[in-house]
Image (tube, helix red, strand yellow):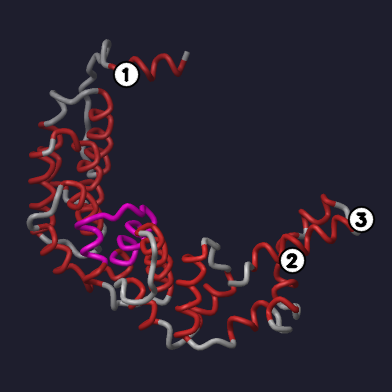
Amino acid sequence: MIDIDSLFKNALLKKLRDGENPKKIEEDMPDLLLEWLDTPNAATNGVSPNEYFYSMDSAQLADALCGYVLSGITPPDPLLNALEDSPDSEQPLYEILCGKRGAFERVEQLLETRRAAAELLNQKGSTLPVAEYLEIVKHPTENPGLNEAAAMGLQAMGEDVREQLLSALSGASDEAADCLLDLLSGLPKKDGRIYDYLLRHFRGRYERRAYLASLLARYGDADAIPVLEGALSSAGYADYIALVEAIESLGGVVSEQRDFTGDPDYEKLKLKKR
């Protein structure tokens, strides 16, 4: 595979060896890169790096993406741009996401290629990977970038995946539920089922009260104020602050002033302010 990044670094090193000002090179770096990508290069068969990839069809581009990861070389931007712009790349990218394209020696290589494919599918606004994204959310992989891409893809689909997100909550782990509830609480249309799930998790998961309070605040139903207020008396300092913020964002007022002397989070904050 052609290491585009290394070729560009070599071009910069040549400028330095030729006596060009290092500071000027650094300042002009973005323009230098754009110009270099459009300049014919012997290493890319005599055409520019951009032309080299844009001359490929979608299958070749997808195979190149797999090949770069397999070779341990970061996929270059011109390849990623060509994949994003290709009108026929959605299907081969989807095949990569599903693990049906490319033969990888290590799991981390497969996951990294799937991450790249997911991000490109998101950029293309694809709705193909709904089931795969839900599976990733319910069973997070060892690649945080892939997990994030799946969540972002579902978020972009919004109302179109409301029912799938709600269905996925059934039997979901706490970690998966956090992500699903995050996505659901941000949907513009209110839904009593979402509110019920938020309340259920808030009441049943003491250790996540601060996070779930923020989701209730985002959901925006003032009926949650009494539930949030009811948790104030037993909350530690960090949770208390989160609860107050949620209550106030929903239009409530907290006048109670509690003494948190001795609370670990409160004492740490006092030390920082000294």
Is residue 123 left or right of 164 when viewed as pictured? right
> What's the magenta region?
133-154
Is residue 115 left or right of 185 when viewed as pictured? right
**Which residue lies under the disc numbered 2?**
31
Is residue 97 left or right of 211 when viewed as pictured? right
Name the front one of labels 3 and 2: 3
Cβ atoms at labels 1 and 3 below 8 Å apart: no
**Which residue lies under the disc numbered 3?**
19
> For the residue labelled by badge 1, is the local secondary structure a helix, a strand or a loop?
helix
Name the front one of labels 2 and 1: 2
Q: CA–CA distance between discs 1 and 3?
A: 57 Å
**Which residue lies under the disc numbered 1?**
266
Mark 3: which amino acid?
Answer: Gly
Q: Is residue 259 magenta?
A: no
> For the residue labelled by badge 3, is the local secondary structure a helix, a strand or a loop?
loop
Q: Earlier in the sequence, mark 3 or mark 2?
A: 3
Q: Residue at x 35, y 57 (%)?
A: 148
Mark 1: which amino acid?
Answer: Tyr
